[in-house]
Image (spheres, rainbow, N blue to C red):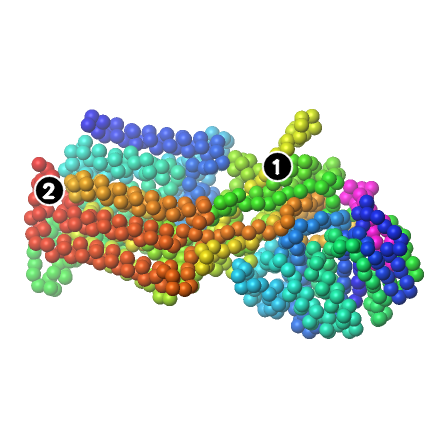
Amino acid sequence: MKQRITFIQRVDAGFDPQQAVLTASSLSVRGLDAAREDRITVGLDELPEEFRAVLEQSHELHLRWASERSFDAVAPFSSRVSPGLHVHYTPLESESSSEALCTLLRTVVAPNKDAQYKDCSKQEDSFITPPLRSTQFASSASLQYYTYLPSIQSLVRYIQTTVCDHSRADGPECHTRADALLSADSVDIDYDSVSHALTVSGLWTSPPMGGWTDQFQKPASAADQIEFGLLGADAGLEPEEIKMGGLLAVVGHDKKLKPTMFSFPSRHQPLNEPSTYAVSFASPTGLHPTMSISMPRSSLKRPPAPSDTTCALHTYLTLPSTIFGDQYQLATTDPLFLESHNLVALHALAGEMDLEAPDWVVQRWGSNWLLELATPRETEDATTTPDPSNWTATIPLHLRYLPPSETGHRTAHIPWPVVFWACTAEDDTKMGINPFDRTNLGWDSLFGPRTLFYQLQPAGDRLVEEVDVPVLRLEGGGDYFQGKHIEFGTCVVISLGFMWVLWRLACVAWSPGVGNKRTKGVHDKKE
Amino acid sequence: MALFDSSARVFLAATALRLILLVYGGWQDAHSAVKYTDIDYMVFTDAARYVAKGESPYARDTYRYTPLLAWMILPTAWEGAAPWSTLTFAFGKVLFALSDVLAGWLVVQLLVRCYCFPAERALRYVAAVWLWNPMVANISTRGSSEGLLGVLVAALLWAALTKKPIFAGLILGLAVHFKIYPFIYGVSILWWWDAEREGSAAAVSGLLSKALGFITPSRVKFTVAALASFVALNLIMYLQYGQPFLYHTFFHHLTRIDHRHNFSPYSTLLYLSAAGGAQTRFEALAFLPQLILVVVALPLVLAKKSLTTTMLAQTFTFVTFNKVCTSQYFLWYLILLPFYLPSSSLIRKPTLGISAAILWIAGQALWLHQGYNLEFLGLSSFVPGLFLAGLFFFAVNVWILGIIVRDGGNGAGEVSVAEK
């Protein structure tokens, strides 16, 4: 087992050497004001049997979970995904069908009954094939799944009851580490069949009250290792580089903290000035809610990418099956439609696209959409006073029919999309090595390998929107709008109508002297 | 009324109305993000583009029509510079609007020739119901293909009333291939076309000779021609496009369960039952009242008294008792109204006619109000709002249907050629 603990201090954060003390057997930190990433790498043989069985069938498995609380992503951890749990999966044999991953996911997710959750019974039923923009970037996983997941409590419990108890020595330590994940802003779990190792990373972008106070013991086994880093990040010499400096140590191996300075290319870049966006649905949402993404105009300056790159503002939507876009409406090239919504183009889409199916017919979890957003014209800034109004892009969406409920309403949980600048270069060589790199985010594989991403910061208390979906109201008790009354009422009215028409027909059929009447009628008309 | 003296004036005005709407539609499409053109038209033209590329029209999602439609509007797929492309894009709409006018012309001809209407009277009714009806002109200039069906039904009537069984059969086969529901006209035309109508008025007694007497040359020709054209068209399309053709043109329409709110009285029940909340499967029998009336009772009782009124009553019943009903379905019976209205009790007794109109509109208004509450305001108006509005609208339609049946029994809309 290998652990890497990284603290990232902001440039303006204070640091006193007494706050990080390394001894021969441990390292302790006290009151540290920093963001923190813990990365634990575990070999397959250190995992419990059922978990190992799932991984052994996987070519690649990547879980990305993000909290729905708002957080400041700091360099070099500036990438984001929509809140919830994203699973990117490539089975070892593409044809293999297995319930093992779904069983595991059910344990990890353990959704409450009320959520519009697409139960995962077999991955080919509930997973979608991720969007593909062009075959040249075909590096993404073959299957993808998403679910709304406000808390990873079940995952933590799973780690504690199976992984911790299975692992060799540090039981209590493992439990504490797992508990700590509950306050993480994002958690990544990665496995691939080449390394045969599982990596779990937790990211906390802000310290707990009073700063980080923790102690890391030298591992008991020689095979285990704890790396420690206390670093600060800054812009590198090249626009695509990030420069980091600070102190590094391997606990129990190094005698003292080693000062260090290094830089590396990074696809995920911070924006110099904080740029924000907010997502909302204009009320009343009806059955056709429109998602608005609004940004202060000051947030929309071109990022500091190399001048030979082309930058465009994008949003990547993760829509649960309860809500969907009309691919024909959004893929239009009609400039009037696009301008009225401040959109440029729909670049990629995948998943459940059916325009008519109700939610209970849809099997897969939902859909993904990559849209390019328009930005205000350049002429507006500089000389004139800055326009204080927000710049808003809107995306027309539609709700699916949901099952009846007692209240006549159900709630659709829609995660905020991510909004980012993507600056693409002609050159499509691979990026250099980045010790803090993050891939398999869903949207990153839709761009070339040298694309630089600059995330806008979601500004809101909660990064999930709740949209009220009107449904058929069925009262459980003795009230009069029960299902059987709808059945009975329809049946009676149709039968009465049917008999009324039959009665009228019978009157005609058995009325005497119709033939005479007919001629008479015609004669009357002519007079 | 001098306005209706000249048929040229009426048709010119109808054409002008459509032309104005076409130009206006083009202008709105070019200047507003809210389009005049119907979404369905985008589906047709997308499908035509696929066909132009040598692919299947069913490559376009939600294209659920015969390939004929996509073939017909192939010119919309022609690429070109700005003014040219606007014209080719509108080709389909022009075609639909022209068939509209042609359908109206056919109805006028039939009224004058077969029903001995004075030209002015015929023009007045057809203009009011069809040619100058803004709804009809609007629907076809927005690019909905219902106008084509109007011309097929009018042509079918013309062939039947002028005693051209093979022609009538061919048209019926084509119409059913186009939109399934015209099969109902086959039954009433068959029953109507007895030996008496053929001129050989040999009234026979005895069950066997009556049964044999049913088989007349016209009936055989009509049936064979209808089956031949229907089978031939389907065979050609099946050979060309295979299973997707069958699925999208027929099976989809026969098996679809439309759970979304619409005018049908079954709509709330279908939602309930599709979501698994129903205890009985009453809706599985929904075809029974509909087909018993449309295929058996109405033709049997009314067809020999008045073919056009029977066809109107059949269409009205089909739409009223259908599991899905949207506003374009109302166009299906509009084309048949000019035959029925002039001698109907709705016109003879203005209070009755006006009450029927008011109730029908009130049914629509009530439903649309509830639909607006749901669709745009997000209120849960399924029950009681939409449920009761749907049943009320159904009741109004059934009541009107009763009037049509009674009038049909009295020979409203009957061909008076015999008396001449």
Name the residue: 20% across, 35% down.
B122
Q: Nearer the viewer, residue A504 or A368?
A: A504
Labels 1 & 2 near each other (Cβ < 8 A) = no
Residue corresponding to mark 1: A390
Q: Is residue A230 magenta?
A: yes
Q: Amino acid at mark 1?
A: Asn
Q: Nearer the viewer, residue B203 or A388?
A: A388
Q: How far across and down, in percent of the image, does residue A7 sit?
A: 80, 54
Q: Is residue B229 left or right of residue A107?
A: left
| Residue B360 seen from this side | yes
Q: Is residue A415 left or right of residue B258?
A: right
| Residue A92 seen from this side | no
Q: Does the magenta stretch mainly form a helix, a strand or a loop?
A: strand
Q: How far across and down, in percent of the image, does residue A33 sit?
A: 80, 52
Name the residue: 68% across, 36% down.
A298
Q: Is residue B257 left or right of residue B399?
A: right
What is the magenta range?
Answer: A228-250
Q: Is residue B193 left or right of residue A316?
A: left
Q: How far across and down, in percent of the image, does residue B274 sit?
A: 41, 60
Q: Is residue B229 magenta?
A: no
Residue sitting at the far right: A255
Q: Nearer the viewer, mark 1 or mark 2?
A: 1
Specify the subunit that label 1 lies on.
Answer: A
Q: Amino acid at mark 2?
A: Val
Label disc, if present, on residue A522 of the rendered structure: 2
Name the residue: 69% across, 74% down.
A49
Q: How far across and down, in percent of the image, does residue A318 sit?
A: 59, 52
Q: CA distance from mark 1 to mark 2?
A: 72 Å
